[in-house]
């Protein structure tokens, strides 16, 4: 394991849910891998890689990296335990293993993604026009379980405050004497009610500033049961405690009965032989992320591949179709007036702000995302039924 990993963060979380907010808000084995350049090029991502277009442009073939110029009360929390022990499983291709859909959620056949060299930074991944890079040089395809705070929102309320023993970016204090610290969650969210087999969207991948002492800033898709108790999530996160650096990384997560699990490995079975949760993503790019229920599991898709799945057995076969879908930015901070950026740091009213676009429901209703920000320090602005901008630089 590389020095980018900081070990397991065994978080003791205690959740407090703010009351009802209403319904208006809330691989393939032959993947190309690029050699590490002798002198990696420094790059600076554009603030608006997608312009005003909803769709993400397909990646071009790569040979060598390019050089580029540079607010509510909460009740007393109750202690909760992780939903499951970590289950890192090698790529599953056995006779009885689930088989993904022939097409990705956005209708394309799976194809080889382009991988930068192991240990590449998000700027180097972007400069190489690659889709991802292994975060370490171990060559392992087993995702690493990481325990850290995670927010959620639903029709009945939002998780706005929790308690944790995690002290970012260091591991938590072990033993009974571990102190509990507050975690404050802030969201800019789009929500839609309706039965569906899943959802996909184009997400702007950015490298927002994460203030010292804060936990994470992320963008994601969350597919949930109608009551918000069962959840599958995919997206990217900047989290020094989980990832060991300030770059955006792919993550997956699930909840059972509103009880959190862990990042990247709890309950998750790998399918891809080239990319895994925790890998570094290209800053400034716009990529497709998706979740789809098929063949008894919840499949996770990124860019051009199926990554892996959460099996129905995690919910005892009771969660096989979603009733609520959300797409959002989330900041987990140590204060209710955070200095951490959301999205690409720009407010939603800026035409160059991060966006969630081309929202689609798989075997469900036509997209109609209702948007809302839950914090005065971040904003959200609807552009169409399928696209919105969001973000901000916090209270500082």
Image (cartoon, grey):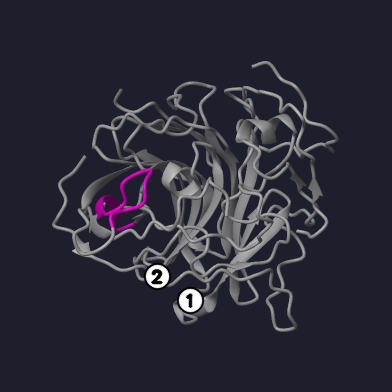
Secondary structure of residue under mark 1: helix
Residue 123 part of the magenta-drawn span: no
Q: Looking at the picture, tell me which residue is in the foreground, 118 or 100.
A: 118
**Residue named by callout 1:** 314
Question: From the image, which quarter does the N terminus lie in?
Answer: bottom right
**Label 2 to label 1: alpha-carbon separation:** 8 Å
- Asked if one can make out residue 82 in the rendered structure from this viewpoint, the answer is yes
Q: Are marks 2 and 1 in contact (CB under 8 Å)?
A: yes
The percent position of residue 296, horizontal first and vertical second, equals 60, 77
Q: Earlier in the sequence, mark 2 or mark 1?
A: 2
The percent position of residue 243, horizontal first and vertical second, equals 50, 46
Q: Residue at x 22, y 65 (%)?
A: 79
**Residue named by callout 2:** 256
Range of residues picked out in magenta: 155-173
Q: Residue at x 44, y 42 (%)?
A: 240
Question: From the image, which quarter does the C terminus lie in?
Answer: top left
Q: Is residue 11 above or below residue 170?
A: below
Quadrant of the rendered image containing residue 259:
bottom left
Q: Looking at the picture, tell me which residue is in the foreground, 240 or 50.
A: 240
Secondary structure of residue under mark 2: loop
């Amino acid at each position: 394991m590389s020095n980018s990993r900081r070990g397991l963060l065994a978080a003791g979380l205690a959740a407090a849910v703010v009351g009802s907010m209403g319904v208006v808000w809330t691989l393939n084995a032959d993947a190309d891998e690029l050699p590490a350049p002798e002198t990696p090029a420094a790059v600076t991502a554009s603030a608006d890689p997608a312009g005003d277009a909803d769709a993400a442009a397909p990646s071009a073939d790569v040979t060598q990296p390019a050089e580029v110029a540079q607010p509510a009360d909460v009740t007393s929390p109750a202690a909760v335990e992780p939903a499951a022990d970590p289950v890192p499983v090698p790529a599953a291709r056995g006779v009885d293993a689930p088989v993904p859909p022939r097409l990705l959620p956005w209708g394309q056949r799976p194809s080889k993604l382009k991988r930068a060299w192991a240990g590449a930074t998000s700027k180097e991944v972007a400069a190489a026009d690659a889709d991802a890079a292994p975060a370490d040089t171990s060559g392992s395809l087993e995702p690493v379980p990481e325990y850290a705070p995670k927010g959620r929102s639903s029709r009945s309320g939002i998780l706005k405050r929790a308690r944790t023993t995690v002290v970012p970016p260091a591991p938590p204090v072990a033993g009974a004497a571990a102190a509990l610290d507050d975690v404050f969650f802030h969201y800019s969210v789009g929500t839609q009610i309706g039965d569906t087999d899943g959802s996909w969207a184009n997400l702007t991948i950015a490298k927002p500033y994460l203030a010292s002492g804060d936990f994470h800033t992320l963008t994601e898709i969350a597919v949930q049961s109608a009551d918000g108790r069962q959840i599958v999530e995919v997206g990217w996160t900047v989290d020094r405690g989980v990832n060991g650096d300030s770059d955006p990384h792919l993550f997956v997560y699930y909840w059972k009965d509103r009880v959190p699990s862990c990042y990247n490995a709890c309950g998750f079975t790998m399918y891809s032989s080239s990319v895994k949760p925790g890998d570094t993503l290209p800053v400034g790019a716009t990529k497709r992320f998706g979740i789809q229920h098929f063949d008894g599991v919840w499949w996770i898709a990124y860019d051009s591949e199926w990554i892996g799945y959460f099996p129905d057995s995690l919910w005892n076969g009771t969660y096989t179709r979603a009733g609520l879908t959300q797409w959002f930015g989330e900041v987990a901070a140590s204060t209710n007036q955070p200095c951490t950026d959301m999205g690409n740091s720009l407010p939603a009213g800026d035409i160059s702000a991060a966006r969630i676009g081309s929202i689609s429901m798989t075997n469900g209703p036509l997209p109609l995302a209702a948007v809302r920000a839950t914090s005065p320090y971040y904003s959200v602005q609807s552009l169409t039924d399928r696209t919105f901008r969001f973000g901000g630089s916090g209270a500082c």
